[in-house]
Each structure stands twice: as C-alpha cells, then as structure tokens.
C-alpha cells in the first residue's frame, strides 16, 4: 500500500505527493478523517484524487493512504430494497450511526455483515463448476430469488457445500482449483465498477420491453436490452416518465440512479415505491428495486461514480438471468460532474467546457446494456435495458450531452415543453421522437399481439404527420378552406392525440395499458376514421360525423377496467355502426 501527503486541495480535487507506487483508479483514504477518494491522474509521484466527500477543512501535509484496489461494489444478498449513495454506502445504516447529517469518513460496509441468509445449494460435492455457474439460491425478498454465482475466473471442483444460515462473509462452499488450491466461496463477491462484467454472447434486440405507456409501446418501443434517452426541458415530465417506467416496465429488477437531480424528486421515489403494489406480484415495488441516491446537494465527484455503481449492480442481476431496467436521472448532471473535475485538472476543454472524452465515457456506460447469454457451463439469458434522462439547459438538444447521447442510443423520446404546457402528458413529441428497434421487433408484435399491429402503427403515424401539414395550412388560410376529408383527418388525429397518446400517470386504470388493450384502442380510432370516410362519400356532412355521440365512448374507453375491455369494445363497435347508418338514412330522406 502506497502512502503520501496532501499537496493541494481544490474543491473535490486533492493533489497528493509521494504516491509513486499507487496505480490509476486506486481507492485512497484522504486525511485523518479517512475520506474516500479515487486516483484519476498520475504525474511522477503526484496523484490527482477525486474525493467523494466534502473536502472543506483539509490542508496540505495531511496523510493520504492508497488501498491498492480499484473502486468496487459488493454484490450479494441485501442489495434489493436498499438505498445507497453514489459509492454504495448504505444511507439507512449511516443514518443509524451518525444521525440525519451524514458525517465524513464514515466506514460502514455496503452489505450487512451480521444478517444471516438461508442458503439452498444447487450443486453437490464433486461437481465441476466454472465462473458464472449458479452455486445455490437465497430468497432475498418475497419475489426475488437471489442466485449465488461462482465468481468469474474461478474454475474447479466443489469439495464442500452445505445448506444453512450464513452471513455474506462466511464460506458456503469450497472449490478446489485446477492447481490444487482451495478457494472459499461466499455469498458476496466484489467487482470493480469501471469494468463491465463478462458475458458469453450478445443477442439481437428482437423483443420489446413492454412498459404499459401507450406512446412508447405503440409508436416508439424500446427493446429488452435496449438503450433509450429521454431529453427534455425543465417541467416537461422526465422524472415522471422515469418513475412510470420503473413502476410498470416488464423487468424483474429495477435499478434507479438519482444522480444529481433535486433531492425532493428522490424523496418522491423513496416515499412512493414502498407503497406501490407491483402489478405482477401484488407485493411492494421496493421488493425488486435498488435505489442509488446522489442528489444535487451531495458531493459532485460521487455523481460520476454513481452511474458505474448502478450499472455494475444491474449487470450482476442480469448475470442471474433476470431482465433488469436501469433508470439514470440524469446523465446531464453526471456530465457536469465530469466537466467540473476536468476543469480542476486543467485539461483542455471541448465543446461548452465539457471534456473531450465526454462521448467515449457516455458510450462506455450505454454499451454495457444488452440482452446477453451469460458465461458458465449452463448459460442463461439476461437483459439489461438502460433509460437515461438528459436535462439540456433551456431544452436545447443541440448541446454536447444530448448530441453525444443521441449518437449512441437507438430510442429517442423527445419531451416537448409546448405539449407539457397544454397538459398533454407524457409530453413525447411524436414528430421528433424515433425508435430504431421497430423493424427488428415487427415479428414479435405481429405474432404476440395482432398480425395487424405494425400496419395499424404506420397508419396512426401517417395521420399524425398529415395533421402537422394540415395545421400549417389552417394557420395560413383558416379551417374553412379545408376539404371535408381533410377536416375529418384532423378530427381523427385529434382523437389519436387525446384518446390514445394522452395518458394519466395518476389514474388507477389509465396509468398502465396492456398491449391487447392498446391495440383495441388503436383499432377503434382507426375504425371511426374509416367508417366516417365512407359515410362522407355517401353524402354525410363532416359536422354531423364529428359530433357523433360515439366519440365520447371512444374517448372514455381508456378508463375501462381490464376485465371489461372486450365487452366495451364490442359495444362501441356496434354503436359506431348504428349511429353512422342512422345518419345515412336521414341523409337519404
């Protein structure tokens, strides 16, 4: 272990001398208060350290001690339902030790060392195992069975394994390696956060991550193992979109990173998630969630680490064969932390002061997502989907963080402040958003939902695009200049916007819409348009068609309880046909 002394303190950056034996990215303990830091630059015997705690009061001459190991997270039972800070310190345990005001230099292990877990072996003495194999299971919460994995790089034969109650540090099994040494295997393993966990093979993104949010599932779907960005100005609903996806996305495990956003938004998550019932299991949502809270008033440098801490935990659950959704809110604040550290290191600034390596750091983060086949003698399939919020200043997505993100991600949900002001939520702009996964997932939607899903989606998008063009004409010459078919087209597009795309996150039924109901809603709107178009040709007036009472029923359909969807659909179907035929009979007279 290398040790030196502080030479200079500049905010979260500390420069220490006498560190010739230290290595890049080593974790160090700074000053007598033993603050946690990480070496990010070395010149000769001088090391630049980013300190993950408040540095006020530090001065030159104080000791700096290297641990000789990179920043790592502890992976094992006890992660689910926990709230960590950016460097995986358990906030609840720190509060018990030091009260509401967090003290500096507190050393508390990430996973509880005293709690005993009931281990059930999955292999026997004499079995050959390799890294990634399942050694046994621990029932961590009511709904999560925590699979204890053989650490990557370990290969050998099990010489001892026994069921029973163990702490995370006690050996549950012994493995004799090929060179004859005995490796004790515990419930917990450590992994360096900046290094992606290994996998066997990356699979193609051909199945969607169903979210229950209509504008996402129907128009801009994200694949399981996909990456998406949600950029939007202040007040456009980024955080609510992230919360909705965390609540309803079809993921076994959710990792939510609040990096640099306001503390009260994280408080919403902490208050809301334990009370929310998971729709699939009926248990609290916290039973499958890991929270990492590094809000805007917490040390800047820890924001940079929080993203890596979160994705390493997410990869660990992916390796168990789970589908994991990771929410990062927001990568802009993380990039600002990079910019601050880069400025203090006196590096050459890139665009808008961000470091030149901003794009490659973002890519390193997002590229760790994917649907994979795991390592091990019996590979499993796991998926890690990453959804990152971006908060561009003033909503201008031409700024560097948004642009660097767009070059990497394949789904772009563009939040629009003008839609938010009109109270249209989720405020996803259907003209500027896109999903590059649509073509690869066409087969899945057509097979699992309805053979006409993609055709229906294209018709919906076509009407919305036509509406944008017609709106321009209306602004110039007024509504009266439009032909009857064009006025009907505008009305159908309004129905798509108000009855289908608009979704109430706080309504007990409307907050989540299964795919079958989404298709029924699309079908009703398009059927209204098709039947009215035919009626127009047969002489009906556009004013009467727009004023049909069935329009109200189509609008209310989204609030129909799931068990009543079929009946309500048939009723609207019949009402539409009878009202149009009545109208046409009147016209004949």
Image: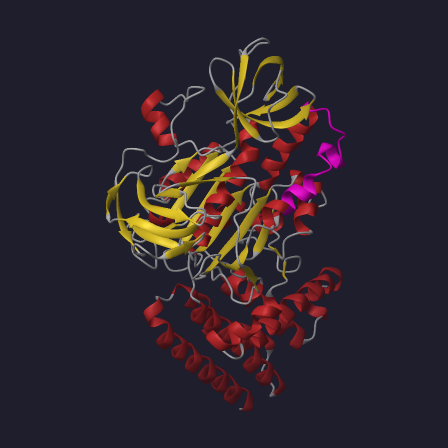
Q: Is residue 261 above or below residue 21?
A: below
- Res. 424 image quadrant: bottom right
Kindly identify the residue that appears in the image at 41 percent across and 76 percent down.
569
- The vertical placement of 494 against 56, above or below, is below
How far across and how far down the image is residue 401, in percent? 67, 42
Residue 18 horizontal/vertical position (percent): 62, 15
Q: Is residue 260 visible?
A: no
Q: Is residue 190 left or right of residue 533?
A: left
Residue drawn at the location 55% of the way across and 56% of the way down: 370
Residue 197, given in percent of the width and then of the height, sits at 52, 48
Relative placement, left or right, of 398 versus 190 is right
Q: Nearer the viewer, residue 47 or 357?
A: 47
Q: Would you say 421 lies left or right of 465 here?
A: left
Please say if 392 is above or below 490: above
In the depicted view, which residue is nearer to us: 504 or 19?
Answer: 19
Q: Is residue 240 visible?
A: yes
**Residue 151, above or below 202:** above
Q: Residue at x 47, y 52 (%)?
A: 325
User: As drawn, is 335 to the left or to the right of 510?
Assistant: right
Range drawn in magenta: 344-363
Q: Residue furthest bottom?
A: 588
């Amino acid at each position: 272990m290398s040790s030196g002394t502080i030479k200079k303190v500049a905010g979260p950056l500390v420069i220490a001398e006498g560190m010739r034996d230290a290595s890049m990215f080593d974790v160090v303990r700074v000053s007598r208060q033993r603050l946690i830091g990480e070496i990010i630059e070395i010149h000769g015997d001088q090391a630049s350290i980013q300190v993950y705690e408040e540095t006020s009061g530090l001065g030159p001459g104080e000791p700096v001690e290297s641990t000789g190991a990179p920043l790592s997270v502890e992976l094992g039972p006890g992660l689910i339902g926990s709230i960590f800070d950016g460097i995986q310190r358990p906030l609840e345990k720190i509060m018990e030790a030091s009260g509401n005001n967090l003290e500096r230099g507190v050393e508390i292990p990430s996973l509880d060392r005293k709690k005993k877990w009931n281990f059930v072996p999955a292999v026997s003495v004499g079995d050959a195992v390799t890294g990634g194999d399942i050694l046994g299971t621990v029932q961590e919460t009511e709904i999560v069975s925590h699979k204890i994995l053989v650490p990557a790089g370990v290969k050998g034969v099990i010489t001892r394994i026994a069921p029973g109650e163990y702490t995370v540090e006690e050996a549950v099994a012994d493995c004799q390696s090929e060179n004859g040494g005995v490796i004790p295997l515990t419930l917990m393993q450590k992994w360096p956060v900046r290094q992606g966990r290994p996998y066997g093979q990356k699979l193609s993104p051909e199945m969607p991550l169903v979210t229950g949010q209509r504008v996402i599932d129907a128009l801009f779907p994200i694949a399981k193992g996909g990456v998406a960005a949600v950029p939007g100005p202040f007040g456009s609903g980024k955080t609510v979109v992230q919360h909705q996806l965390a609540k309803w996305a079809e993921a076994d495990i959710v990792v939510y990173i609040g990096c640099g956003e306001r503390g009260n938004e994280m408080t919403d998550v902490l208050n809301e998630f334990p009370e929310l019932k998971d729709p699939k299991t009926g248990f609290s949502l916290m039973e499958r969630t890991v929270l990492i809270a590094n809000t805007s008033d917490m040390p800047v440098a820890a924001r940079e680490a929080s993203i890596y801490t979160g994705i390493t935990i997410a990869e660990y659950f992916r390796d168990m064969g789970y589908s994991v959704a990771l929410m990062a809110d927001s990568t802009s604040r993380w990039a600002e932390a990079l910019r601050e550290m880069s400025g203090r290191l006196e590096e050459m600034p890139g665009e808008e002061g961000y470091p030149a390596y901003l794009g490659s750091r973002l890519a390193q983060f997002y590229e760790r997502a994917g649907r994979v086949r795991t390592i091990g003698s019996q590979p499993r399939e796991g998926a890690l989907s990453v959804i990152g919020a971006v908060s561009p200043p003033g909503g201008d997505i031409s700024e560097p963080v948004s642009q660097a993100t767009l070059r990497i991600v394949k789904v772009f949900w563009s939040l629009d402040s003008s839609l938010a002001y009109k109270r249209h939520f989720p405020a996803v702009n259907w003209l500027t958003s896109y999903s590059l996964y649509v073509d690869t997932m066409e087969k899945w939607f057509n097979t699992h939902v309805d053979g006409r899903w993609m055709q229906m989606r294209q018709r919906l998008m076509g009407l919305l695009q036509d509406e944008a063009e017609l709106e321009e004409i209306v602004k110039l010459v007024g509504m009266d200049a439009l032909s009857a078919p064009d006025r009907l087209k505008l009305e159908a597009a309004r129905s798509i916007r108000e009855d289908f795309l608009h979704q109430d996150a706080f309504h007990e039924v409307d907050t989540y819409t299964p795919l079958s109901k989404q298709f029924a809603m699309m079908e009703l709107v398009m059927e209204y348009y098709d039947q009215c178009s035919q009626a127009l040709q047969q002489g009906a007036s556009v004013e009467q068609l727009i004023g049909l009472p069935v329009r109200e029923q189509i609008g209310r359909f989204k609030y129909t309880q799931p068990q009543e969807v079929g009946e309500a659909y048939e009723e609207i179907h019949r009402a539409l046909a009878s009202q149009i035929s009545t109208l046409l009979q009147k016209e004949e007279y």
